[in-house]
Amino acid sequence: MTERPILMFDSGIGGLTVLREARVLMPDRRFIYVADDAAFPFGAWEEDDLKAHLLDLFEGLLDRFSPAISVIACNTASTLVIDALRERFPGHPFVGTVPAIKPAAERTRSGLVSVLATPGTVKRQYTRDLISRWAQKCHVRLVGSDRLAGLAETYMREGFVDEEVVRAEISPCFLENEEARTDIVVLACTHYPFLVNRMRKTAPWPVDWIDPAEAIARRTMSLLEPVGETSGESEPDIAVFTSGKVDFATRRLIQGFGLTAR
Ligand code: DGL
């Protein structure tokens, strides 16, 4: 008998930042990575349309792959649809990815925290609720970026990124007054950790960049039963792109993450 897989979902390659952590923690698990690239970027969608689209899509994905658990490795999707997914598919466990505002509020010394995310995540009520619940004593600045997720996609395929664009996109995260300056930036889009070295390089001063990937992987592991003894060859980990188009650079990229395109 083969184990049911873990399904990891994102609009593009961002969820790979979570997959790599999950792989380290759960090397005996099978993974199915789903990139809804036909709908990329989620950050630009109207909320009602994106919600309907994701609920529909998951109907098909759960049917097709029968996963043990689904990880929504995307803040833009999770902050919109995680509750609705749990309601629609009550027997199925979902792990969401939401802006790491609570750990940032616990860790900041200056009290000035920025959350860097897609325009979708920035405008969500879910994000606002996280701030009022966990970060009342801080000043939290929400910074929406139109370009960083797309830049990360290109960077991971072609190895090129325009550092001046990175500098411009992150610059609103940095606040300074007479007593204090921003000391934490929450990476609230799973694409962004791929660009974090460029962000460090172009930041006006050093800050702590919070990447929630390991915490999400740990949460996923905690919800699963340990893997039993399996016999015979295990099936390969696969990546599914909803556009059906996988070019050479993408195939190469996902190969580097141990995935085969389907
Ligand atoms: N990776 C997604 C996130 O965590 C967003 C990218 C997009 O806009 O589709 O928010």
Image (cartoon, rainbow, N blue to C red):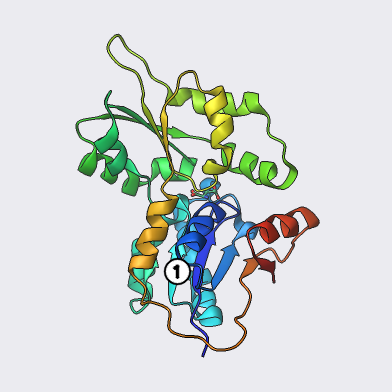
Dot 1 beta carbon under 8 Å from ligand 1? no
Q: Looking at the image, which residue is at 64% across and 63% down?
A: 258
Q: Is residue 61 above or below residue 33?
A: below
Query: At numbered mark 1, what does the secondary structure look like: helix, strand or loop?
Result: strand
Horizontally, is 50 left or right of 220 in the view?
right
Residue 6 can be seen, yes or no: yes
Q: Looking at the image, which residue is at 54% across and 77% down?
A: 60
Q: Quadrant of residue 217?
A: bottom left
Q: Could you say where residue 45 lies in the image, as x and y percent from the top left?
A: 53, 50
Q: Looking at the image, which residue is at 68% across and 29% down?
A: 162
Q: Quadrant of residue 202?
A: top right
Q: Residue furthest top?
A: 178
Q: Could you say where residue 28 lies in the image, as x and y percent from the top left?
A: 50, 73
**Total marks in image:** 1
Residue type at the position of mark 1: Ser
> Image quadrant for the C terminus?
bottom right
Residue 146 can be seen, yes or no: no
Q: Looking at the image, which residue is at 74% across and 61% down?
A: 246
Along the viewing direction, whichever of 21 and 71 lies nearer the viewer: 21
Q: Could you say where residue 219 lies in the image, as x and y percent from the top left?
A: 35, 61
Along the viewing direction, whichever of 174 and 131 lies nearer the viewer: 174
Quick one: label 1, few (<14), some, or many (20+) residues within 10 Å? Answer: many
Q: Quadrant of residue 136?
A: top left
Q: Could you say where residue 237 lies in the image, as x and y percent from the top left?
A: 61, 71
For disc 1, the marked residue is: 70
Q: Residue furthest right?
A: 248
Horizontally, is 247 left or right of 163 in the view?
right
Along the viewing direction, whichever of 214 and 245 lies nearer the viewer: 214
